[in-house]
Amino acid sequence: MNTLRNRVQLIGNLGMDPEVKNLEKGKKVVHLSIATNDTYVNKEGEKVKETQWHNLVVWGKLCDVCEKYLKKGTEVAVDGKLTNRKWEDKDGKLHYTTEIVVNELLMLGSKGN
């Protein structure tokens, strides 16, 4: 049952090209965002489409795959864990963000996309 704790699986389209940062000692990190869509019928009988945006963080060897093959609009399936972090900007203001740290990534769609 431990494998079900803090696990996120999403399928969506990239909202931006991968943002690759080269770190010390040859390490990389990639930041991405994906959009997931949900459709429902409201009380007036109208079909409503809602889009949710999710911030993704990729570490390790998977960064090379992201950098080489992914671009804005690519449909992907991701598996990872939800994380929250906070940081202080140069003015001393605290900022908070929720991200999905990706463990696995699958490119969906045709090779032409």
Image (tube, rainbow, N blue to C red):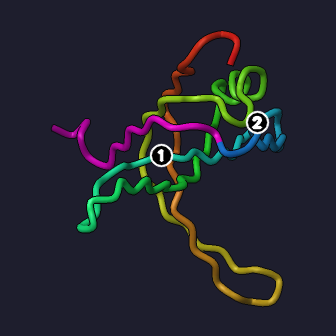
Q: Amino acid at mark 2?
A: Lys
Under circle 2, the secondary element is loop
Residue tagged by mark 2?
A: 27
> Residue 36 shows which numbered tag?
1
Q: Residues within 10 Å of mark 2 (few under 14, many from 20)?
A: few
Range drawn in magenta: 1-14
Distance from disc 1 to disc 2, alpha carbons, whole Å, reads 29 Å
Write down the quadrant of residue 94 in the picture: bottom right
Residue pictured at 53% horizontal, 53% vertical? 54
Residue 66 drawn at (x, y percent): 70, 28
Q: Is 88 or 109 nearer to us in this picture?
A: 109
Residue 109 drawn at (x, y percent): 56, 17
Residue 75 versus residue 83 in the image, above or below: above
Residue 74 drawn at (x, y percent): 64, 29
Whether 51 is among the magenta residues is no
Left or right: where does residue 43 sit relative to residue 7?
Answer: left
Most distant residue in the top direction: 111
